[in-house]
């Protein structure tokens, strides 16, 4: 128990962490190129925020939240997703008063009480982007474009962009009525969750993973046939923008974002490379959300991307993540006087930006060398009585075995 991480969580040991560094640096870089700025919000929020921002009828709010009471009796929830907190911060800081649009990105851990399986964890990690204040389908195309390019830059070839429109509350009301009429005779055959959805949010039944329900909704009325003129035009604009950007897509009328304040664009990047949990990135437009959490009526669009699923897909596509540079110089020493000189040299080199190590285990000289080898130090330097007396040191290149003699005075410059 004590030595097991809680179910659904994963340690990230150094052998893994370098991959995450790589991914995070690449993501920050592409965000810079696309003009998105980082936003950081707390790991926990008031529970109410997610009830509103994600929605009472969703799986996340109904059964997946890590919610607890703090010592003052407030209901607190570990963030299950990134959009609501960003929205909350935007409203709290009255960011809408500044230059528009706001383009945010984030890199965060998220928490959901789910059944752990491949690609599904209880603590997982997301990248996300959001654009606030634009109703123009240029913004939708922009968030899709950054996702598409990032996925491509990470060597993922096997991924498909699927897009849909979930319309606005007006078109959705008409679709909901049609869907209920269609499903009513099949109600008893629906899974218990979908029977509930039938009352609360029937559109989500289209998204049910159960094969029986999928079969039942095969010929169900689709949102795309119920779009009002404005929403239909927006969908056409989005497709035209994606065409102009050269981004291939497939229209999948089954993609839904099931909340009232989700509007128009819905999309997913899906891969077949990592099994059943193949959605690497999912997002859409949420024109009602900012108002819902207490801000001025403000449109928004964005996505969330699972970092674990990204890495799994990259590896499945054979992408080689470069290892980080390790120790450049290992300084071996023998004797107390030499130790002082070695510590001084090490400090000087480290201040100058060189990655240097010395033994901290009390090893003898022979074992210091062995250790330098084991940690793949690029170069070693030995300082002993002899070297102190002559003032001459040898730098050894560990890969080639080449040796070079330099003076104690010039060695720091030589190694920098
Ligand atoms: P799923 O289809 O897997 O249920 P979702 O619709 O619940 O995903 P979103 O809320 O859209 O997911 O989150 C965005 C992305 O975060 C997903 O596309 C996925 O890559 C990742 N993700 C979501 N839940 C998990 C999880 N439990 N473990 C790992 N990654 C996750
Ligand atoms: Mg989910």
Image (cartoon, grey):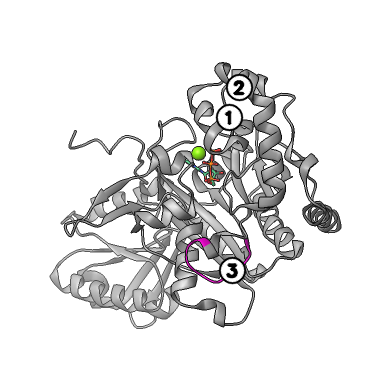
Which of 85/248 is in front?
85
- Across and down, in percent, residue 371 comes to 30, 51
- Look at the numbered discs 2 and 1 and tell me whether their residues touch, using CB distance below 8 Å: yes
- Across and down, in percent, residue 354 comes to 40, 71
For marks 3 and 2, give the CA distance. Answer: 36 Å
The residue that appears at 40% across and 75% down in the rendered structure is: 406
| Secondary structure category for the residue under label 3 | loop
- Relative to residue 345, is residue 54 depicted above or below? above
Tell whether 387 sits left or right of 237. left
Depth-wise, is mark 3 or mark 1 nearer the camera?
3
Where is the N terminus found, in terms of image quarters?
top left
Q: Is mark 1 within 8 Å of ligand 1?
A: no
Q: Which residue is mark 2?
A: 213
For marks 3 and 1, give the CA distance. Answer: 31 Å
Q: Earlier in the sequence, mark 3 or mark 1?
A: 1
Tell me if residue 26 can be seen: no
Q: Which mark is residue 208?
A: 1
Q: Quadrant of residue 141?
A: bottom right
């Amino acid at each position: 128990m004590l030595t097991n991480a809680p179910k659904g969580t994963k340690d990230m040991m150094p052998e893994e962490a370098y991959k995450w560094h790589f991914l995070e640096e690449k993501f920050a870089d592409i965000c810079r190129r696309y003009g998105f700025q980082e936003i950081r919000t707390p790991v926990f929020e008031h529970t109410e925020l997610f009830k509103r921002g994600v929605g009472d009828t969703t799986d996340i709010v109904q059964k997946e939240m890590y919610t607890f009471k703090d010592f003052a009796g407030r209901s607190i929830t570990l963030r299950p997703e990134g959009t609501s907190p960003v929205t909350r911060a935007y409203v709290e800081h009255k960011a809408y008063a500044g230059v528009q649009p706001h383009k945010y990105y984030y890199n965060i851990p998220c928490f959901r009480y789910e059944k752990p399986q491949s690609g599904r964890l209880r603590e997982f990690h997301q990248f996300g982007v959001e654009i606030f204040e634009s109703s123009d389908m240029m913004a939708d195309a922009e968030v899709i474009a950054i996702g598409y390019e990032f996925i491509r830059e990470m060597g993922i070839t096997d991924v498909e962009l699927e897009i849909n429109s979930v319309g606005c509350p007006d078109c959705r009301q008409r679709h909901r009525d049609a869907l209920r009429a269609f499903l009513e005779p099949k109600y008893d055959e629906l899974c218990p969750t979908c029977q509930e959805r039938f009352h609360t949010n029937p559109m989500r039944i289209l998204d049910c993973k159960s094969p029986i329900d999928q079969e039942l909704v095969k010929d169900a009325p689709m949102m795309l046939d119920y779009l009002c003129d404005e929403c239909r035009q927006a969908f056409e604009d989005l497709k035209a923008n994606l065409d102009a950007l050269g981004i291939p897509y497939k229209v999948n009328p089954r993609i839904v974002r099931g909340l009232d304040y989700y509007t128009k664009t819905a999309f997913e990047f899906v891969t077949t490379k990592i099994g059943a949990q193949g959605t690497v990135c999912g997002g859409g437009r949420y024109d009602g959300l900012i108002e819902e959490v207490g801000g001025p009526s403000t449109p928004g669009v964005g996505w969330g991307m699972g970092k674990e699923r990204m890495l799994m897909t990259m590896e499945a596509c054979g992408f080689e993540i470069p290892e980080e540079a390790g120790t450049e110089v290992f300084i071996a020493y023998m004797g107390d006087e030499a130790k002082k000189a070695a510590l001084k040299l090490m400090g000087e080199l480290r201040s100058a930006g060189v990655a240097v190590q010395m033994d901290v285990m009390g090893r003898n000289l022979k074992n210091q060398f062995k250790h330098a080898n084991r940690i793949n130090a690029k170069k070693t330097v030995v300082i002993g009585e002899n070297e102190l007396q002559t003032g001459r040191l040898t730098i050894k290149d560990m890969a080639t075995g080449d040796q070079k003699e330099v003076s104690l005075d010039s060695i720091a410059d030589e190694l920098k």
